[in-house]
Amino acid sequence: MNAPESGLILDAVDRQIIRATQAGLPLVPQPYHAVAAQLGLAAGEVMARIERMQAAGIIRRIGLVPNHYALGYSANGMTVWDVADDRAEAMGEQVGRLAFVSHCYLRPRHLPAWPYNLFAMVHGRSRQEVAGKVAVIAALLGDACHGHDVLYSSRILKKTGLRLTD
């Protein structure tokens, strides 16, 4: 993989680091040190290369990806909202700051079948719990919202990051 927009070209060591971390970082107190030891590199070199790949946009983010089902959150609903366009961005920022919203974003409407432009993922141990959180969002959106729905997950489809095949 190359990143023509940044000019950064991955070398063999970069590829080793990606391969060593693509299934997740080791669950140890110093994961980058563990990756470095696995590859026979200095921890500082591993961290510097990861920072360089982040700066180049090859690695966009490093984050925790929880398995909500394993944590007991089996009622996971993507809430979708029809919010006034002139207020959607500001309202979306407020919804995204709610502690129980894991991610929130705007998407274009596809009228007439799909009037929703604001999406917010809500997790709960029951649909009743999710309904309570949806009510909080509805109250926050107030008259800026013209309708909403909740699309519950029925299974985990994908939770992976960058994968190199060569």
Image (cartoon, rainbow, N blue to C red):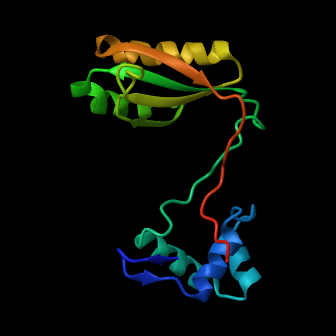
Left-right relation of 54 to 23? left
**Which corner quadrant of the image does residue 125 belong to?**
top right
Q: Looking at the picture, tell me which residue is in the foreground, 89 or 136.
A: 89
Q: Residue at x 64, y 66 (%)?
A: 163
Rendered location of residue 43, percent (x, y): 63, 81
Left-right relation of 65 to 114? right
Left-right relation of 78 to 154? left
Q: Residue furthest front?
A: 112
Q: Looking at the picture, tell me which residue is in the foreground, 156 or 46.
A: 156
Q: Residue at x 71, y 62 (%)?
A: 23
Rendered location of residue 20, percent (x, y): 70, 73
Considering only vertical position in the picture, is 52 above or below 90? below
Rendered location of residue 162, percent (x, y): 60, 63
Considering only vertical position in the picture, is 94 above or below 134? below
**Which corner quadrant of the image does residue 144 belong to?**
top left
Q: Looking at the picture, tell me which residue is in the foreground, 42 or 91.
A: 91
Q: Residue furthest left?
A: 86
Rendered location of residue 76, percent (x, y): 64, 28
Can you say which quadrant of the picture contains the C terminus?
bottom right
Left-right relation of 44 to 75? left
Considering only vertical position in the picture, is 73 above or below 82? below
Q: Evaluate whether residue 38 shows in this view.
A: yes
**Number of numbered discs visible in the structure rendering:** 0
Q: Residue at x 64, y 71 (%)?
A: 164
Q: Evaluate whether residue 98 shows in this view.
A: no
Q: Residue at x 52, y 83 (%)?
A: 10
**Which corner quadrant of the image does residue 100 belong to?**
top right
